[in-house]
Image (cartoon, rainbow, N blue to C red):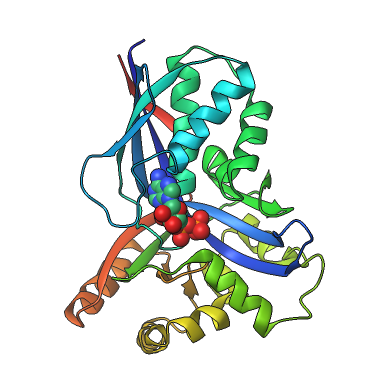
Amino acid sequence: MTQVTVRAPAKVNLHLGVGGLRPDGKHALATVYQAVGLYDDVTVVESDHWAVGLTEPADGVPLDDDNIAIRAGKALAAHHGIDRAARITIAKGIPVMGGMAGGSADAAASLLALDRLWDLQTSDDDLLRIAGRLGSDVPFALLGGTALGTGHGEIVTPVEDASSVWWVVVLSDDGLSTPAVYAHFDELVPDAPVEPPVPDALVAALATGYTDEIGDLLANDLWAAARDLRPDLVDVEVRLRTLSPDGVLLSGSGPTLLVLHEDVEEARTTVAELTEQGLRCTLAPGPVAGAHVVTYG
Ligand code: ATP
């Protein structure tokens, strides 16, 4: 095999419960991830040195060894004790610094693509372990579907999800730094629990698949911190709530906002109304599959 392309999805956090800062500098999370249909495609080819490029320019994506797709490739090579490198090309469909884990998707895609390119036959458990060391959201990008995330988000357990929903994804022109949002959360909530509680009611609602019930239970502990750092989001949130009082959510650490719909036609109407108001938005179904090979040759 000389070339492999893997597609990996964005995620939303239907519930993002955040605990206090741990001694290792990470936050304990109790989150419910759902993979949604915005994708990055990552193509790898054998090379004698590491290199990364984008099919289209995108602000904020490093084009050197800091790119998490390269860090993932190096971690996989180190795990197997091999000295190999690759040229990685990323086609970004996931907003950069949007709170939808685009970088994590690229890391997951890179792991899977290089495992196949080099025929390493890494076990799923090992891939998840390597992924978890790269970033909290990387294991979920491998898994996809809907899953409970604990630890600092890296311990993923699939949950039954009978829902089939459409997210209106409201994009922001400027990104929001995930570390800055967490740092402000620490200031706002100095007494956050050591272990945030698992959202049992949401997990039960997902098993029934009732969108209204799921909409009522959407929650994100980072919302207050994101609103403080980006006051302009408040106006957008108010406009979204007039369209859908219960199904509005901040995606991860933001600034992307989401509106939940069961019906695709209603979702399209929302997109049309918001576009008319001058907002930039797109549609994404959920849940969808995790990282998967789309072409090889
Ligand atoms: P998360 O929700 O996981 O915190 P995000 O979706 O808000 O992340 P990303 O687009 O993943 O944001 O980017 C987060 C940071 O990672 C940025 O500072 C960016 O420079 C860096 N980064 C490294 N590699 C990549 C990559 N392949 N794609 C996007 N960002 C990357």
| Foreground pick, 189 / 267 | 189
Q: Is residue 131 left or right of residue 44?
A: right
237 or 175, which lies in front?
Answer: 175
Q: Is residue 132 above or below residue 120?
A: below
What is the x, y in percent for residue 91? 28, 41
Q: Nearer the viewer, residue 102 or 217?
A: 102
Q: Is residue 173 left or right of residue 9?
A: left
Q: Which quadrant of the figure contains the C terminus?
A: top left
31 with respect to 74 (left or right):
right
Q: Quadrant of residue 48?
A: top left
Q: Is residue 289 visible?
A: no
Q: Quadrant of residue 296?
A: top left
Q: What residue is at 43 percent from the left and 82 percent from the top? A: 230
Considering every residue shown, the one lying at the far right of the view is: 194
| Image coords of residue 145 (percent x, y) | 54, 45
Q: Residue furthest left?
A: 276
Q: Is residue 88 above or below residue 278?
A: above
Query: Is residue 271 at least partly visible in the picture?
Result: yes
Q: How many marks?
A: 0
On the image, the x and y values in percent for residue 19 come to 74, 68
Q: Which quadrant holds the N terminus?
A: top left
